Structures are given as structure tokens and as C-alpha cells.
Amino acid sequence: MKIEIKDAHIIDPSIGINEICNLYIQDHNIAAIKDPPEGWNADHTIDAQAHYLIPGIVDIATRLREPGQEHKATIESETRAAVSAGITSVVCQPDTNPVVNTPAEVELILQKNNSANHCHVYVIGALTQNLSGNILTEMAALKEAGVVGVSNCHQPLANNLVLRRAMEYASGQELTLFIHPIDHALSGQGCIHEGMTATRMGLTGIPNAAETAAVGAILALIEQTNVRVHFCRISTQRSLQLLERAKFDGAPISADMCAHQLFFSDQDIKSFDSNYHVIPPFRSQVDVIGLRKRLSNELISSICSDHQPHDADSKLAPFPSTEPGISSLETLLPLVLRLVHDEVITLSMAISLLTYKPAQLLNINAGSLAAGMPADICIFNPDLEWELTHANIVSHGKNTPFLNQTFKGKVTHTLVNGKIVYQT
Amino acid sequence: MQHFLTTESLSKDQLIAILDTAESFTNVDERTVKKVPLLRGKTIVNLFFEASTRTRTTFELAAKRLSADVLNINIGASATVKGESLLDTLRNLEAMNVDMFIIRHQDSGAAEFISKHISPGISVINAGDGRHAHPTQAMLDMFTIRKIKQDFETLKIAIVGDILHSRVARSQIHALKTLGAKEVRVIGPRTLLPARVDTLGVQAFHNMENGLKDVDVIMMLRLQKERMQGGLLPSEHEYFKLFGLTQERLALAANDATVMHPGPINRSVEISSDVADGPQSVILDQVSYGIAVRMAIMSILAGSE
């Protein structure tokens, strides 16, 4: 099968292209950009005039809810939502039920994804057994099964000694550690940023120090062990300052932010709307500005969705009793385009943070349009305005504070391995 | 007004209307037949997910004096333990054709949540949600202050104690600010004052003597025993030493300063007995005004249907 995509505005920072031209796909891979391969004869042509074409988006933090929470979402439903939003690679987190402790869970997820057959799914394995924070998982076996890293998600480790051992052991297996910096004693039962909104609404706050204290402790252990660590979902300006300084001093670290953290502060929480309940919490306006300012920094390797689809009941309770998280696959690209529109980052930097930088972090064969790469492609109309409604959210999770907002920029085609998996 | 959830969103006129209506009910309990027929035929449910004697009783009495039928349901944590969601519990009760719910719940935002999911035509009164609001308590406090001091504009008021965990304090602050109080202070150890409490429009003091200077009204808060856990306070003894309201400290306030407390009081923890029982204390008046104020709020909600 030969596909020709004509007259697209192709942007791929990994190969330094930013111009209107054609792209040629032969079977599963990219054959050429600009000039067709010799003797080219397309079987199928996509007219992409006035559209952008970028590498398929790589989302490093996606909850697919399977196995164990199929009432919230399934691998099939969420990967279908992913491709409708131009995302061609998602990374499943280990906090499923059962937890991704062994190759068995990894294989189950990959098998389920084979039958769903929408996009690529990668898996992060558990750092400790059942994420209980005490006993390490069999990381060599997990690595062999194909995990792209290990993480304890939001669950605490017993103490810093376990963290140190886990870091050292994981690095011996050449597995990247994905650490959520949370001091669990300081965050306690909190459900909102400790600040003026928490005070006004009488909700238990999570102080900035719950993140910065953990960042400090982890950095101290990195200095001790020289282990490579990726810091997940940074929410405070101060954490970024600490991390940037450490990176400047040579620490082997990277970090990411999730898109919605760049749009809401605690002051946007006007009523007890549980769609705003998210961990880490929406921080202060100072933090939002600080995060935005640092997006282009070398430290940052991804803007991710941190997609957490929920069933309606999980959000139907008073705010503190609801489950945290936002269904956010389908707002990832539109929100990043808003950042470009607001001149927070350049389009080229935005595409880097959605494609080749996260692919590099995960060490996967994705995020680039170089000839020979798998033809994972996102084509979008940058001018099309649309409204996010309950009815048009593809994900099973309808939990989002962006509901009924208007976005500019809509995906029209998604290709995975040279196959059109989504088109409007 | 269909629901009464917080003092925060209400205008000065609305607050004053409640106080004026309450005034008209103060003589009801002096009659031989302590009843008015305003809510005859209405069913009011006291739905308490958290233990309470005082608040529930005054609501019950207020509803009965308005001739309503009253049902008391103390759910505690039992229904949630059985796995029934808050919404399911509510739907079950709704099916019994209730006109008004009076709700206390341990989660901040519970009353607002219920008001958003309840059938139209049913009113919700917040009788305390988590640390968020306890607006009827605040209104009876406002009523008490107005009875004694008449005018809010000249008043310096200090709220003393565990502001962090207090829904009463939050509702008092909003009501006092809207009613135009000259100055509202909060006094307590840093561990018991919420972050950025100044954004509520109050001045924070960590020293009782400085905070009480020249105030016209002292509103004490109850100190929960469990605050000794988790490093918020070392002991009741030290708390009383630093923040207990004694005669000596009361003397620092204005000469005619009024002492209030939402009850139940912990003698020698937050307040000494001679102050609690002394001439400047209006703690028991607050309780009796509580009935009139709750009658006022219920009748206003019923009248707006």
C-alpha cells in the first residue's frame, strides 16, 4: 500500500522540517518527504492542503483502566480516543488491578491492545510489588517483557532507603525510573492546593512543600547514586527551579508537565466541581506562570495528558470524596496549540514536546518523520473551531473541567504504522 | 432563596432580611402555644451524617414551632459503610416526598453537592459541611451581636481558636464582612490558622493579648481533642495557657466586650469558667436565638417556593 499525503504543512523538529510539501508512505513506514521515491505510484492520496502534518503524538502518561477497572474504560475505548486526538503512542501506568508486577500483566495489556489495534501501547512496570513500597518487583523480567520504565505511581515508598535501593537496582537493569515526587506525610488527606481557595472552601490543602521536599530528597539520592530519573507531573515553580539547578550541575534527570496544569490555578476552582479534583492539585497562579515560562527548558521532555478516565459515579460525591483525575487525551493537542496561540512556546517546541522528546525519553521508535520510521502521523486543521461536549468525547471518561469549551485545531487524520486509523 | 448553603454568596440585604425575620419569631416561645402554622403540612428531614445534639435539636424545635412534620435521621458512617452512595441515600429519602433537607456531612461541599442533585422544589439547609460552612450558626451569632451591639460598622471582632478546622469561623467571617464589621481578627497558633487566611479579609494574630486589644466581640471556637494528634498542638494545658480566655485577658478587650461560643464549651481548655458564666458571656442566649434564626431561614426558604 502506497499513501501520498499532498500539500501538507509538515513540521518535524527531529529532522528540522517546517514547510508545505508532500509525504510518502510505503506499507508501514515513511518512504520520503518532499520528493517522491523513484517510480512512485500512489494507491491512495490524502489532500492535506491548509493542514498541519506532524509525527504521531507520544503521550507518556495514560490510564487505560484495564485490567481491573473496565467500568471506567478499556484499552479498546481509550486507544480509540487516543487516535481520534492524533496520539499514536500511549504509555500505560502500572496502577492497574492487578498491578503491573510481572510479565503476565504486561503481556495481557499488549495482547488486548493487539486486538484493539488502534495505536501503540507501551507499559511502565511497577517499581515495588503491588506498589506497596517495600519489596522490589522482578525488574529484569519486566524489562524482558518490554516495559519502558518502572514507577510507583502515586503510592509511597516505605522510606528513602527503599527508594535508594530501587533506584540502584532499576538502573542496573537499564530501566528509567518514573518518579512522582510526593511527600505523603505532607500531602496527607489533601485534595486541593494549600492556598486561598482551600482556605475559603474549607478543603484540606496540599502544600507546595509536599512536592519540593520530595524533589529535594530524590535529588540527594541521585547525587549519591548517579541514577537517571524522570520526574513526573511537576506542578510547582520551585520544584522546577530545584530540578533545573540540579540538571545544570550535571544530574541525569528530566521532567514532564501535564497539559491541564498549565491552564488552571486553584483560583479557578469556584465551586465544589469535582472535575477540578486532580493530583497534583491545580497550584497557585504564580506556579502556573512559572511552569509556562519553563516549558522550553532542556529539563522538560514531555507535555503529557495524564489521562485518567472515570465513570460518572467516581465524580458524583462531595469534592473530597471523589476520585482525582481528568479525562484528557482529547484535549492534549488542542491545549498545547493554545499555548502556541498564547505565545507561551513556539509551534516547533510544542511539537517537540509532543513527539520526539517523549519518544527519546522512552527510547522508542517513534516521534519522527525520518525516512524508514514507522508511519505514525497526525494531520490536523489548525483553524477549525470545535466545542468539547459530553457527546463528542470519545473516551469513556467524560470527567473534564474543559467541558463545553471551544478549542481551535482539530485532528482530521491519524495514521499508525502506515494505516489510517482515524479520519473525520 | 431556594437553598441556604453558605453565608458567602449572600448580599447584605439577604442577611438582614434573615435577622429581621428571626426577630419576629423571638416571641413565639413566650406564647402558651409555642407554634405558628407557617410550615403546616410540610415534611422536613434532619439528615445528619455526623453526630450532633445541639444543632439537630434546635433545628427540630424550630421546625416543630413552624408546625412542620420532622424526621430525624442519623446516618453516621453506616450507610457509606454498607456501600450506599450519598446520592442513593438521598434518592431514597426524596421518594418519601420531603420538602426540605437539613444536612450535616463531614465533607466540605456536601450541601452544595446535594442541592445540585436534588429534585427541583426541595430545599436544602446546610447544618455544617466539613470545614466549609455552618451558616445557620453564623447567622445566630450575627443575630446575637446585633441584639447587643445594634450596629456592625463600629465593631472590632476577634475569632479565637482553631480556625483551620472550623466551618463556623468561615461562615462568621463571610457574614461579618458582608454586614460591614469594622475589623475582623483571627487569633490562634499558626498550626490552627489556614494558609493565606488574610485573603478572607481578616487580620491574623498568634498572640492572644495583642489580638484581643480593644475588641468589642470575642467569638471563641471549640477545640477538638483530636488536634493533639499530628503535631498541631502539644497539650490542652499549653493551649489554655496561650489562648484560653481568662478574666485577665478579657480585661484587654473593650469594657463592654461580649463573649460568645458556639458550644459545647471545654472549660479550662478554651475558656475559663468565670468568663463562660460571667456577665459578659452570651453563650446561652446564642442557643435560644438559634431557634428563632433557624425558624426564619426555614420560613424564608418555604416562602420562596
Image (tube, rainbow, N blue to C red):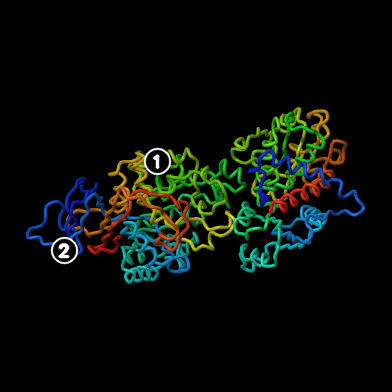
Q: Mark 1 is on which residue type? A: Arg
Element marked by disc 2: strand
Q: Which residue ends up furthest to the right in the rendered image?
A: B32
The residue carrying mark 2 is A2
Q: Quadrant of residue B15?
A: top right
The crowd level at tag 1 (other Cα within 10 Å; few <14, some 14-19, many 20+) is some
For mark 1, name the chain.
A
For mark 2, name the chain.
A
Q: Is residue B225 left or right of residue A210?
A: right
Residue at x 73% of width, y 42% of height: B17
Residue at x 34% of width, y 62% of height: A122
Query: Are the two marked residues, 2 and 1, in contact with CB atoms closer than 8 angstroms?
Result: no
| Residue mark closest to the camera, 2 vs 1 | 2
Which residue is more in the foreground, A95 or A167?
A: A95
Compare marks 2 and 1 and give the one earlier in the sequence.
Answer: 2
Q: Is residue A348 left or right of residue B269?
A: left
Q: Position of residue A36 (x, y in %)?
A: 11, 55
Q: Position of residue B115 (x, y in %)?
A: 63, 55
Element marked by disc 1: helix
Q: Quadrant of residue B211?
A: top right
Q: Position of residue B75 (x, y in %)?
A: 70, 63
The residue carrying mark 1 is A292
Whole-number angstrom distance, CA of label 2 to CA of label 1: 41 Å
Split into 4 quadrants, where in the image is the C terminus of chain B? bottom right
Which residue is more in the foreground, A18 or A186?
A: A18
- In this view, A62 is above or below B261: below
The crowd level at tag 2 (other Cα within 10 Å; few <14, some 14-19, many 20+) is some
Answer whether residue A347 is visible to the viewer in this image: yes
Q: Is residue B95 left or right of residue A236?
A: right
Answer whether residue A227 is visible to the viewer in this image: no
Q: Mark 2 is on which residue type? A: Lys
Q: Position of residue A28 (x, y in %)?
A: 20, 64
